[in-house]
Amino acid sequence: MNFQLLRIDLIAVCPEIFDSVLNSSILKIAAKKNLVKIEVHNLHDYASDKYRHIDDTPYGGAAGMLIKCEPVFRCIESLTAERHYDEIIYMSPDGKKLDQSDSNQLSMLKNIIILSGHYKGIDQRIRDRLITREISIGDYVLSGGELASLVLVDSVVRLLPGVISDSESALEDSFQNGLLEAPQYTKPADFRGLTVPDVLLGGNHKLIDKWRQEQSIDKTRKLRPDLLVD
Ligand code: SAH
């Protein structure tokens, strides 16, 4: 089957952080199967001075350094001159908190750019002029956007058709239907006296589906009642 290739351009100050994650497990397989193309750009390559400075002190005086406009504009403009991008995302703690529906939606796009900040963040003019979407991975502050970008990339790429061989398995994960996943068990059926619920051993798929649905609702009610409020 032919699936549409998703292209992701990652822009970062410390791109070496990406190496091991992009070259392992599902992300590696997805790239190998040509289902995703991930290009990494080092912001330092777009600096205009010979010392490759990409940061400077904030106007008005404040602690820390900010990423300057120049290298980010140069990098993003060089990419958008080549092709249309559906989204230009900035990873930021004050962005929209990532959830499964964001990942589902992004997995259907063709070209996306993901910009990681660093230091104290980036010049506001980058956000005003270039960025189409801002995403946070949670209410805490990381020292750079690289890890956050990887979280986003992983959650999107595993949803691409053909990436996970049993295509249903990604659809059955927690959050896909607004509920947490039911408990799962594998062999043996009895481990040191700890047994697997009988219904799962019986082979009656109607009963198993019913049990899973009930467990799913029960677990969500206990652990994440906020998901049930609508
Ligand atoms: N001064 C900023 C934080 C900068 S943290 C503030 O107070 O909002 C440095 C970089 O790490 C940011 O530019 C962003 O790209 C990334 N980052 C930190 N926490 C993040 C989070 N929770 N989600 C996504 N990106 C985050």
Image (spheres, rainbow, N blue to C red):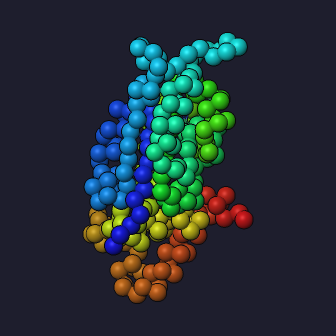
In the image shown, does 85 or 138 lie closer to the viewer?
Answer: 85
Which residue is the extreme one toward the front? 81
| Residue 16: x %, y % from top left | 34, 32
Q: Position of residue 62 (x, y in %)?
A: 65, 14
Seen in the image, is 79 located left or right of residue 97?
A: left
Q: How many marks?
A: 0
Residue 157 falls in which quadrant of the image? bottom left
Instruction: Please say if 57 is above or below 95.
Output: above
Residue 137 in sight: no
> Residue 85 at what x, y percent from top left?
52, 49
Image side of residue 175 versus residue 157, left or right: right
- Which residue is found at the position 44% from the left and 26% from the top? 46
Asked if residue 187 is positioned above or below residue 42 in the image, the reply reads: below
Query: Which is more toward the observer, 154 or 89?
Result: 89
**Residue at image coords 42%, 81%:** 199
**Quarter of image, res 39:** top left
Residue 101 location in percent, x, y?
A: 58, 59
The C terminus appears in which quarter of the rendering? Answer: bottom right
Residue 94 in sight here:
yes
Q: Quadrant of the N terminus?
A: bottom left
Residue drawn at x 40%, y 87% is 204
Frontmost residue, 192 versus 167: 167
Quarter of the image where ligand 1 sits: top right
The residue shown at (47%, 37%) is 78
